[in-house]
Image (cartoon, grey):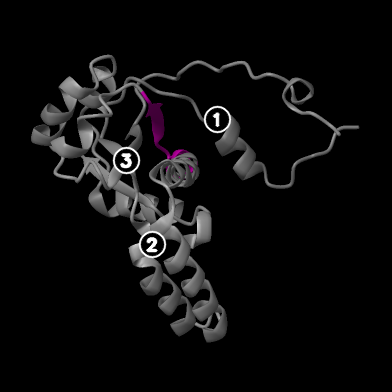
Amino acid sequence: MTTTMKNNGFTHIMKGRRSIRAYDPAFKISREELKEIIEEAATAPSSANLQPWRIVVVESEEGKNTLRPLIRFNTQQNDTSSAMLLIFGDMKSYEYAEEIFNTAVEQGKMPPEVRDRQLESILTIYPTLPKEVVNDIVKVDSGLLAMQLMLTARAHGYDTNPIGGFETDQIAAAFGLDPERYTPVLILAIGKAEEEGYESVRLSADKITFWK
């Protein structure tokens, strides 16, 4: 039986997304709209709502010149996109816990007793977690943000390309971040597509799903 999707807008956005490598170099997304896209995408879920993603927006000629040697196989995206979004995971995101949960209480989104219970747990557990555990958490959470960024950009009429091939051991320091605190996750090129991109094949649900 075929079911008609009610949310055709979302389906169009999701199924129309392509990984675009060539952009219109003359087109520039404004900072205001980029900020709007980031704020919309940042509604993504995260562990304990700590929102560990941090984004460096590389849009200037100077910034792109700094980035170019660190993404040797993806320079076309760097040179033609409106911006390159460098996504990092903050290994000390728990330092924002009080601000996040106090704001939730102030806005009437959480009872004070729930905040107190949550904060006690977070501030007791997170600082003691092994580095590799925190690294896994922030990378999963930042990956959720990245996917929402791609779909949000598409909804705004732009295209993206997720990039995992870059100098992960150099990129934080190159942009003034502490490499011990900020772990690189991926880079997203964003801009106005100059090519359609290829529609790719996906494995069927039967091949990726296990029923028990």
Q: Which mark is residue 183?
A: 3
Element under disc 1: helix
Determine whether the residue tagged by mark 2 lies in a helix, strand or loop. Answer: helix
| Mark sitting earlier along the chain (2/3) | 2
**Where is mark 2, residue-wise?**
94
Q: Amino acid at mark 3?
A: Thr
Badge 2, how many Cα within 10 Å: few under 14, some, many 20+? many
Residue 140 location, x and y as percent? 49, 42
Q: Residue at x 26, y 18 (%)?
A: 76
Counting labels gives: 3
Q: What residue does disc 1 label?
A: 16
Q: Amino acid at mark 2?
A: Tyr
Magenta stretch in the rendered image: 150-164
Q: Is residue 151 magenta?
A: yes
| Viewer-nearest of discs 1 and 2 | 2
Q: Which mark is residue 172?
A: none
Give the x, y percent position of residue 192: 34, 31
- Residue at 54% from the left image edge and 77% from the top image edge: 117
Left or right: 61 with respect to 124?
left
Name which residue type carries label 1: Gly
Residue at the image point whose x is 76% and y is 28% from the top: 209
Quadrant of image for the N terminus: top right
Q: Residue at x 51, y 69 (%)?
A: 121
Q: Looking at this view, is 84 or 47 the one in front? A: 47
Q: Along the horizontal axis of the image, is 81 left or right of 193?
A: left
Secondary structure, mark 3, is strand
Q: Is residue 131 above or below residue 207?
A: below
Q: Earlier in the sequence, mark 3 or mark 1?
A: 1
